[in-house]
Amino acid sequence: MIPAPFEYEVAESVDHAVELLTTREDAKLLAGGHSLIPLLKVRLARPGTLVDIGRVSGMVGVLDAGEHLVVGAMTTLSDLVADASVSVGCPLLATTAAQVGDPQVRHRGTIGGSLAHGDPASDLPTTLLALDAELVVRGSGGERTIAAADFFVGFFETALGPDEILTEIRVPKTGAAGTAYLKFHHRAIDWATVGVAVVVESQNGSISSARVALTNMGPAPVRASAVEAALAGADRGAVARAAEAADRGTDPPSDLQAGADYRRHIAKVLTRRALTQALS
Amino acid sequence: MATTEQPARHVGARVPRKEDPAMVTGQARYTDDLTVPGMLWVAFVRSPFAHATIKGIDTSAAKAADGVVDVFTGADLADDFAAPIVCAWPIVDDIKIPEHWPLTKDKARYAGDKVAMVVADTRAGAKDAAELVEVDYDPLPAVTDIELALADGAPILHDDLGTNLSMTWRHSEHSPVPARGKPEDVFPAADVVIKEKYRIQRAVPNAIEPRSIIVEPSPAQGEFTMWSATQIPHIVRTVLTLMTGVPEAKLRVIAPAVGGGFGSKLQVYGEEALLLVGSRKLGRALKWTEERQEAFVATTHGRDVVQEVELAADRDGTLRGVKVRIVCSMGAYMQLLTPGIPLLGAWLYGGAYESDAYDLEINGVFTNTTPTDAYRGAGRPEATYCIERAMDALARELDMDPAELRRKNFVPADAFPNHTIVSGLIVDSGDYHASLDRLLEALDYEGLRAEQKARRERGDNRLLGIGLSTYLEMCGLAPSRVAGAIKLVCGLWEAAQVRVMPTGTVQVMVGVTATGQGHATTFSQLVADQLGVEIDDVEIIAGDTKQMALGMDTYGSRSLAVGGIALHLAGEKVVAKARAIAANALECAEDDLEYDTGTFTVKGTDKTMHVKEAAFAAWTAHALPDGMEPGLEATHVYDPPNFSWPAGAHGCVVSVDTETGEVDIERYVAVDDCGVVVNPAVVEGQVQGGVAQGIAEALYEEAVYDEEGNLSNGSMTSYLVPTAAEIPPIETHHTVTPSPTNPLGVKGIGEAGTIASPPAVINAVIDALSGLGVTDVQRPATPQNVWRAIEEARQ
Ligand SMILES: Cc1cc2nc3c(=O)[nH]c(=O)nc-3n(C[C@H](O)[C@H](O)[C@H](O)COP(=O)(O)OP(=O)(O)OC[C@H]3O[C@@H](n4cnc5c(N)ncnc54)[C@H](O)[C@@H]3O)c2cc1C
């Protein structure tokens, strides 16, 4: 309830934020605060300085750049849900964001915070992995672009350096592909016990490609490559069999929420249901 | 001045709750909203170990920190207490009750046990300094599981006791009333005997308002005022007097607006005693507000019981005997009522059924966990869960419909009034067949069974289950003589005072304190009808020992069934005095007056006098009958002659996803008989809240300890309190059999929902899966636990 003492700074720009990250000891960015503030309150996070990026301009909103969407890192989840170019160009992003937390969380929480936090139970990282998105980050060494597959490194660990800030996310449009994000959780407000994002391209019942990614089936979101391989070039009758391979190559945790064996089982059921939904 | 129009009757009407505008607009003041001048803040240092010897405590760094006024350890306060924390219910003569000090001195016995108290000028300062207190712990093996705590070689919590078993209570040995018969005379010859074992998980009450305490001393007078988020200001005052030596006359305890308690504020906590002692020592006002995560370990928990039950029956389903053995976790120490909680269910393991024999054994065990105590229903949910699960198991064994089996065994309506049930207590009134019939009709039971069959036959992976739970509970606590006979240290009477003011408004002082139940509305309705005034003309004053010195406070669904009767009887005394005043003023005999809702009329005339006019006459005292005291007011202290006995039938309809184990409650129907209903909206609110809490126990909540004895899910993220999104609409119905033991015919409704609903939900889940061979599911029935039950049955 009562955080340990810390300094507080408001960043004026991305460069200013990078400067504060570089010069202050144990500095941490504050976006919507819905992951960070709970940690501060129970003193699990004890940063020296909080750098508030809530007033940096140019980091909010979605831009339609033709082949892909450019999403500002400070765009809130509820803005993603409501954005017209998202619902046309990449509805999976909106349906995923809509399943995060509750309205209060979605109104404050940002896509950037959700990705940078590196929580294996988060929903959006999985979806961005299935979408082959790219993340643009800026640090004292300049700007670089990281593929989603390289960004989520481990348990609460990303490719972001200590002086780097995530500025935008480039999300390829999904066109005619069928998509779905299914989240298995106990209470409506709970994080995913398991989640699955699917992007399937098919014609007349024949699947040309399928991308499948899983939430909370390891320290970071993972692609279910065995399922993807089994579906490439197959027809929709292959879905049930292919989904049985959903847990192959995963390393699900056993925790209070669920045991690893149960997670493996749910991953299969959920993958089958998500593929079926995306193909219908 | 005659009032001709007939005032509306309020009892039985959906009067909107008087207390809500202040609560929903944020104007109600809770303890944490209050500030007193010069107040200091307190933070507690709590053991991070479930079991550890304390080898030393170094407070020097904390004392030196900015803004810190003082830091106390148990040793520092050794001379400030007259007695340790009080356990007021030693249920057997040879019970083992360990010494329990507000700050532990030798050993920490649960993660959260308090070892030091920091006083600083700000809340954050106190919290920061608490981190600087260095405690040298020598960790010991811990035991949190009740059965393991009784095993050979288990770590012993209290070395001086030499055992973790605190007590054993047997109905056959300790009940002041005998059972109808002995199991040993019935079981050997029975056609059918079933044996079941159930585990009721530990629950964290989680009132929305955490605890908060302020103590303000008036050193010159030696007086103290305490504000505390408590259900029991009167008991807090008396117990703190015993613990600290501050005389009752010098201690005022106020419970301002209190945001829920559910039994967790039916307590006198070490923190309350420490703030009182600390403020006496420092001569300064002190405040402490519990943090939410602190509350998870610092506020009492509930349930945590293992039950072994045997039922004996004839082949045709006639119940012959009930035999139960339970083991209950006390936690690490005894709190106010800890050992007595299972006793509140000890006569109810036979349910609403007749049978020939009954026995129950209760064992209380210490574990390295937060102490347990009352949690909404206290003892009765445990009893109801046990018998209602077992009745379903018996129905399966006999291949009988569970509704039919219940119907066959209910105490019949014509056995009442005042029927002695198998466990020996006398039940006032009831019609259990009527409640069940009403439920089955509301559910369309036949239709549901057909739908269930259809789904099974077409191999649907969403199976339908119908769960029944019919309950009998004992509330309106309680006849003081009975309380004494079962070794509770206090009596359980209740008090009220009614004062009609000169201008005709009514001041009512009651000994029962609300924590959200709607007392002010319900009591105002009673008074408005009795004295012929408007609801808004009634002022209900409670929760302040200075304004109402008498009271035994709120728990056990007693506020209306005991407190409301005290109020009614005080009102009768007021009416009697007003009658004498009216007879004098109207120049007639008292017998010539008719009374109706505030108005006295001289029979056969249009001469009238209202209670309000009598109040004015009593105030001016110009023309009172000779020898009459001025003023129109009366007090009544009521000791109920019996408990009151609500009952009912709840039904839950679920569909279970056999692939994932998810349980979806399709319908929940409650039929409750709480006697006469004063305010249907308030009663429905109590049922809905109670059922929601029971669904939480059935499907969501469980306090989980890890191997080291730490509470693994002590936060609102990991301890799954369901939200509005999880709770289905709850359909409420009523049957009414007025209680013959009190003049209002009321029984109580505060706990019915948590008593009835867990077995209804779990029975529904098992009913859905019974075709797959499932006969049990671990509580809470999370998707994973249900899936595991299905997998086990498949093997
Ligand atoms: C009750 C509740 C329920 C929730 N349920 C879910 C759920 O179901 N699914 C789910 O996925 N999430 C859930 N969340 C998490 C929520 O989605 C995240 O808190 C939120 O999206 C994170 O964004 P934020 O803006 O609040 O980040 P913050 O809390 O401000 O920051 C989080 C972390 O990211 C860093 N950071 C933030 N922005 C940047 C940036 N631009 N560049 C670099 N680093 C940055 C911060 O330094 C910090 O370490 C829930 C949260 C709550 C409180």
Image: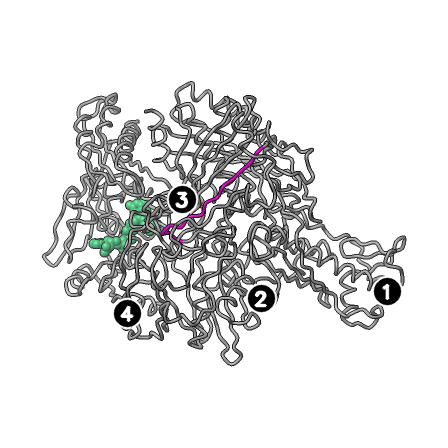
Which quarter of the figure has residue B663? Answer: top left
Query: In percent of the image, x 42 and y 23: which residue is there?
Result: B771
Q: Check disc 2 and give the amino acid type.
A: Thr
Q: Secondary structure at mark 4?
A: strand
Residue depth check, mark 4 versus mark 1: number of the one nearer the observer: 4
Mark before the other along the chain sequence, 4 or 1: 4
Can you give x and y, in whole percent of width and height, for residue B241 in the image? 52, 68
Is there a contact, CB below 8 Å, between mark 2 and mark 4? no
Report which residue position mark 4 lands on.
Answer: B58
Image position, residue B623 (x, y; %): 84, 71
Q: Earlier in the sequence, mark 1 or mark 3?
A: 1
Q: Is residue B432 above or below residue B556?
A: above
- Name which of mark 3 and mark 4 comes first in the sequence: 4
Instruction: Name above or below for residue B729 compared with residue B318.
Output: below
Are discs 2 and 1 both within one chain? yes
Please give the residue where the numbered disc 1 appears in the rendered image.
B584
Q: Amino acid at mark 4?
A: Asp
Q: Which residue is mark 2?
A: B545
- Magenta-tinted stretch: B357-370
Circle nearer the N terminus (2, 1): 2
Observer-side mark, 2 or 4, equals: 4
Chain letter behind tag 1: B
